[in-house]
Structures are given as C-alpha cells and as structure tokens.
Image (cartoon, rainbow, N blue to C red):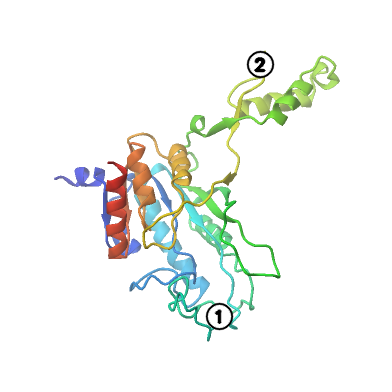
Amino acid sequence: MTEGEKIRSNYIINLDALSALKELPDEIFDCCITSPPYYGLRDYKTKGQIGREESPEEYLNKLVEVFRQVRRVLKKEGSLWIVIGDSYAGTGSKKEYKDPKNVEGRAGQKKSITENLKDYKSKDLMGIPWQLALKLRADGWYLRSDIIWHKENAMPESCKDRPSRSYEHIFLLSKSKKYFYNFEAMKEPIKEISKKRYMRARGKDNKYLKENTGAKRQSINEAREYGEYIGDNVPQFRNKRDIWTINTSAFKGKHYAVFPPKLVEICIQAGCPKGGIVLDPFMGSGTVGMVATLMDRDYIGIEINKDYCQIAKERIENSMK
C-alpha cells in the first residue's frame, strides 16, 4: 500500500495527538472537526493526556501546539471546527467528599485540579474557550465564527448562585483567508416572521423603496444572504445562524464525553466536500469517524486511549451494518 492509499483509508492512530500529527504529511485533510479534553474536567487515566496540566495556561499552550500541527496537515482551503466548553475554578470545599456511587468521582477524578489556581479565584469562570480562540488567532489561524451549541437537555447543575450552563462553543477557524465553505448546504428555511417583514418592506406604500434609498439596498443585500434576489416571491431560505440547538444524544459506551452526530453532520456539510478527508485528533468514541463514513467522506482519527480506539472502531463498523 502506498502512502497516498494509506492516507485515504479510514483508520484510528493510537497515539497522543501531537506525536501522531507530526508523522502525517503536509496538506492532506479537507477539514478538522474535534473536541479536545476540557481543562480539569475528567481524568482518562492515560499518560500524556491533555486536560490535566498544572495550569490553564499550560493546557492552552499545549493545545496551540497541537493545532499548529493541524494547520500544517490541512489543505490550504481547509477549516477547523473546535467544540469546547468552559471550566470553573474549584471551591476546594468538597475534596473530602466521596460519592458512594462514584468513588473515583463522576468524571473519573478523586480531586479536582482546578483548586488553588494562580490568578483564578474560587468559583471563577475561567474563560477557556475564548482564551484558546484568541491564542489560535495569534498563532496564525483565521478566526471566522463563534457558534453557540445550545443544549435544551443540558446536564443539571446544583449551583444556586448563577444560571445553569446550557451551551458550549464551536469555533470555526480557517488556514487561509479563502477556504471551503458550502453555503448552499448551510441554508435553512426562512422564519415566518421574516417573510412577513419582507412583505411589509416590499409593499406599494413603502416610501423608502419608492425613493430607492438605502432601505432598498439593505433589502437586496438581505435577499442575497438568502441565496436569491428579491423578485416576485419572498425568499424561502437564509444563511444558517450561529446558534445551533442540538440536544445531546445517549451513548452506552464507557466514554464520558460524546457530542451528537447531528452537530458533526452540520460541520461536515459546511467544511468538507464529498470524497474529502476529515481529521479528528481527539477521536474519543468515534463520532466524527462514524458520521464521516455515513456521509461518504474518509477520516483519520487520533486517540491516546487504547480502549477508546476499540470503542470507536466498533462503533463505526456497527454504524455501517
């Protein structure tokens, strides 16, 4: 098998992300869709794992190094979609508490590493997602969009001094100023209230349209956004917005963090042409590989945990039966 044929194959590399990426050739992937381990949230009991660094700064710098390699292996028109949530500085008040149902802690850790962090007060929201996005931009990425992944079935929280969290960030970044983005695939039906607004704007008594002022130009520009000009019919579609309401989906495997296939499907539709190759350097349970396969794309996954490699492999194979 030639190197090119190997690249086109669907497989998972059992290594840490940085080491595996350094072994891959330049400019072979159409897009990267991934969700790195969140800082201080879980302990996967694997040497060299990301997310257990002594400080948020060390964690962020490690991710910048990983995604620098991702940029190298992406094609010039390639894009990067990062799903990432935030973390809170620990209170330090529950370190002696042991959950009788989860002696290792609900996230596989007996004690949070977010306690007593320098420059972070107890209960501080760290702002990890935007810190990462800005560091990646400074490192050479084009920061194109901050998409909100809204979850109506978000995990309940016991907090009584702030709102419960119900969203995570999806950052869209690109390697170059011009990159592949399938606008047609990302169009969505226009809302009924918008249709009514168009009808009012185009009414015969609309003095602004009669005078051919900026209001008319604005209406035409809005119509362009929907993929068609104002004509006899009201536009039926618009460009997809940056708030995606997608509920989490159940997964019976042993992996803690699984994002829903629908989320990956949208990213692939937008960022990877048919027949292209998708990269996931933090493969986990294999959602990206599974959806890529079902959508006639190839994939390469990287996963440091051997058990998760097997889980992902079986999940992808079962999805094709």
What label sits on residue 44 in the rendered view? none
Please, which residue is most extreme toward the left here? 1
- Residue lying at 29% horizontally and 47% vertically, measured from the top left: 318
Left or right relative to 46: residue 89: right
Closer to the camera in the image, 305 or 93: 93
Labelled pair 2, 1 in contact (Cβ < 8 Å): no
> Horizontal and vertical percent for residue 16?
32, 64
At x 76%, y 19%, the residue is 202
Where, by quadrant of the figure, is residue 197 drawn? top right
Amino acid type of the residue tagged 1 in the rendering: Glu
Q: Is residue 24 visible?
A: no
Picture coordinates of residue 225, whole percent (x, y): 62, 29
- Going from the N terminus, do you reach mark 2 or mark 1 first? 1
Looking at the image, residue 292 lies above or below residue 184: below
Residue with the most extreme front position? 100
Q: Quadrant of the C terminus?
A: top left
Q: Which mark is residue 115?
A: 1
User: Which element carries disc 1, helix, strand or loop?
Assistant: loop
Tell me the crowding category of disc 1: few under 14, some 14 to 19, or many 20 or more residues within 10 angstroms, Cα based.
some
Counting every numbered tag in the picture gives: 2
Q: Is residue 214 above or below residue 91?
A: above
Q: Quadrant of the N terminus?
A: top left
Q: Residues within 10 Å of mark 2 (few under 14, many from 20)?
A: few
Q: Mark 2: which amino acid?
A: Asn
Q: Which mark is residue 233?
A: 2
Whether residue 197 can be seen here: yes
Left or right: residue 301 versus residue 101 is: left
Residue 119 in the image: x percent, y percent?
61, 77
Element under label 2? loop
Residue 170 is situated, as x and y percent measured from the top left of the image, at 53, 51
Instruction: Determine which quarter of the picture holds residue 69.
Output: bottom left
**Above/below status of 310 relative to 229:** below
